[in-house]
Amino acid sequence: MSDPFWAYLERLPGNSAALFDWDKALSGWDRYPLFRDHFLQLTKNHATAVDCPTECGLGCPRSVVTHVKTNIRAICNEKEYPAVQLTTRQTLIYRLKQSAINGAICAALGIEHRESKFDGLPHTWRLGDFIPTAGMDFPVVLTMQDSKDALAEVVRSLCLSIPKPFVLIAPTRLHLSPAVETLLAQRSSPFIALNEELHLGDEPRFLTRRDKAAIFAPLIGQVPEPDSGGTVFFPTPPGTTWPQIKIQFRDGHTVTIWAGEKTGRYSYGEMGMLNRKNNKPTVQWRWLEGFANSHGEIDWKNKYSAVTLKKQKQELSKRLRAFFRIEDDPIEWIKETKTYRCKFRILPEGDEVY
């Protein structure tokens, strides 16, 4: 049986409610006292309405009326049922400690916790990254929406703003429509329903119901096998920018790469620049070598330029972004000199400076 608070969060505006409402929704759950004490935060506000405790079917809230401090009542606006006596504490508004919940989710799922809010997307947070292997990371996003339309709008925005596969997490799959499932599948982005995967243990932390490798299997499946000869990924340290990367050719087939404390030697195949028709380097690899031999710059007069210069630049940038897992463009266009210039440092074989 799943923990009931996940479903409650999806129908709770602003993730806050009177203590009376939290108690009504969750008091039958044996972990509720633990959840309340560690994941709810008292605010300075008092409720003006609470959920109706009767099963009349109307679903309308009850107004909170204070006669004196010792006489607070929840009044049925339809006058169908008698008033319910409340304590002052029951009218206090408690809100979810979002940062505590987010951190606990990351700890349970093995997510590198680097939390930030998505501008323009309500109740949506980037929790951090799932990193199945060094240099390969997938953004993890938590969203708490109250309708299918709201969730669909969030997913459409995420697909436009995140250029690679990501993990979408929600309290339940109640609002996951077939259209959204299709959109996520097209982006190779898995969906995780927290009520299916996590439960609150005896301590104030979440436990997984199955192995993390099973939860993230769609992403782990994208990790290349070691020594397969196929594309791999450089273990780029978090926060690395292109100017912090150095590439030097060792021969016509391999380069040595430095980024912070990370270094390694890679072939054109491992960098995704293998022509599978003839097992030779692609044009992008030759163009990368051209940058090395031209002090990191190529213009229209350079012997490495061609009529497809712009297209080749786009393809090389795509390969480098994928290999280093850095989202911005590694090659810039200098309008004044009509030159393509590498933002990273690149050297030919034998050279040390340029």
Image (tube, rainbow, N blue to C red):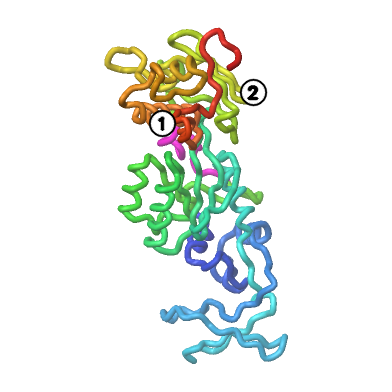
Whether residue 335 can be seen here: yes
Residue 75's image quarter?
Answer: bottom right
Alpha carbon distance from label 2 to label 1: 24 Å
Q: Amino acid at mark 2?
A: Glu
Q: Is 259 in front, or is 317?
A: 317
**Tag 2 residue:** 261
Whether residue 1 can be seen here: no
Tag 1 secondary structure: helix
Position in image of residue 130 (x %, y %): 52, 38
Q: Quadrant of the C terminus?
A: top right
Q: Residue at x 53, y 76 (%)?
A: 51
Residue span colored magenta: 207-221
Q: Residue at x 56, y 71 (%)?
A: 24
Looking at the image, tell me whether mark 2 or mark 1 is earlier in sequence order. Answer: 2
Residue 257's image quarter?
Answer: top right
In the image as oriented, which residue stretches furthest toward the left?
277
Is residue 149 shown left or right of residue 324?
Answer: left
Q: Is 228 in front, or is 79?
A: 228
**Tag 1 residue:** 318
Question: Is 302 included in the stretch rendered in magenta?
Answer: no
